[in-house]
Amino acid sequence: MTAPTEKQIEEARTILHSLDTTRKRLRAAGQRVAIADAMRSAAIAEMGQAIRDHRALLDTATGRRPAGHRIQMDDAEELTGLSRRTLSEAVGKTDVRSDAELAIEYQSYDYDLYYGGEELHRRYPQLAALYEARMLLAKAESERWHEEHPNESGFGPVEPTQGQLVLQDEYRRRVSAIAEGRPLC
C-alpha cells in the first residue's frame, strides 16, 4: 500500500473541514427552525387569546353592542393571513400561556429569566437580542475596568453605563407592552 500524496492529504483535510462546517451549519439552521416554529406557535396562540379576550369582554358588556364590534373569523383570517380553521383551533386551545401572562410573571419575579423570560425570548427574538446586547456591554465594561485596574480584584463597575441603561429601558418597555397586550412599536 502506498502512502497518500500531499494532494490526497489536502483533499482529505478539505473534506473533513467541509463535513465539520456542514454539520455546524445544519445544526444552526435547525435551531433557527425550532425558534421559528416556537414563534409561530406562540403567535397563533396569542391570536386565539386575543379573540377569546375580545369575546369575553363582549359577553360581560351590559349595553347594546352593534354587530360590527365582534371579530368575525373572516376578518381575523384577513388580518392574520391564517385560515379560519387554524384560528378556530387557536381560539379553542386554552392550555397555552399567553404572551401577556408570561410577561407579567417575568416582571413580577424582577426579570428572572427562569420565570417567563426564557419563553418570552423564544417567542420574541428581539427581546433576546436586547438582553444579549446589554450583557455584552456589561462584559465589555467589566473587561475595560479590569484592564485599567490590573491590581484590583472584584467585579468592576457596579453602576450600569448609559448605553446599558438605554438597552434596559427599551427591554423593559417592550416587556411591559407585551404584558399589557400592546404592540411593541
Image (tube, grey):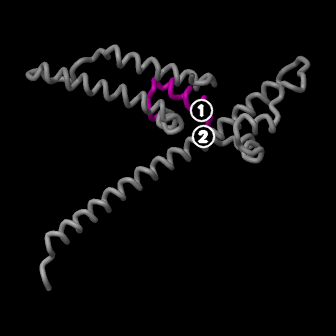
Q: Tell me which amino acid carries mark 2.
A: Ala
Q: Position of residue 141 (x, y in %)?
A: 25, 22
User: Is the N terminus in the top left, top right, bottom left or bottom right quadrant?
Assistant: bottom left
The quarter of the displayed image where residue 27 is located: bottom left
Left-right relation of 121 to 47: left
Identify the residue at image location x=69%, y=34%: 49
Identify the residue at image location x=72%, y=46%: 86
**Rendered position, 7 above or below 182:** below
User: Is the C terminus in the top left, top right, bottom left or bottom right quadrant?
Assistant: top right
* Crowd rating for badge 2 (residues with CA inside 10 Å; few <14, some 14–19, many 20+): many
Identify the residue at image location x=31%, y=60%: 18
Q: Position of residue 168 (x, y in %)?
A: 42, 20
* Crowd rating for badge 1 (residues with CA inside 10 Å; few <14, some 14–19, many 20+): many
* Residue sticking out furthest to the left: 151
Indicate whether residue 107 is drawn in magenta: yes
Image mark for residue 99: 1
Q: Tell me which amino acid carries mark 1.
A: Asp
Indicate whether residue 66 is drawn in magenta: no
Name the residue carrying label 2.
42
Say which of 104 and 171 sits in front: 171
**Rendered position, 13 above or below 89:** below
Q: Position of residue 22 (x, y in %)?
A: 36, 58
Q: Secondary structure at mark 1?
A: helix
The quarter of the displayed image where residue 161 is located: top left
Circles 2 and 1: CB atoms closer than 8 Å: yes
Which span of residues is magenta-colored?
Answer: 97-115
Q: Earlier in the sequence, mark 2 or mark 1?
A: 2
Left-right relation of 30 to 16: right
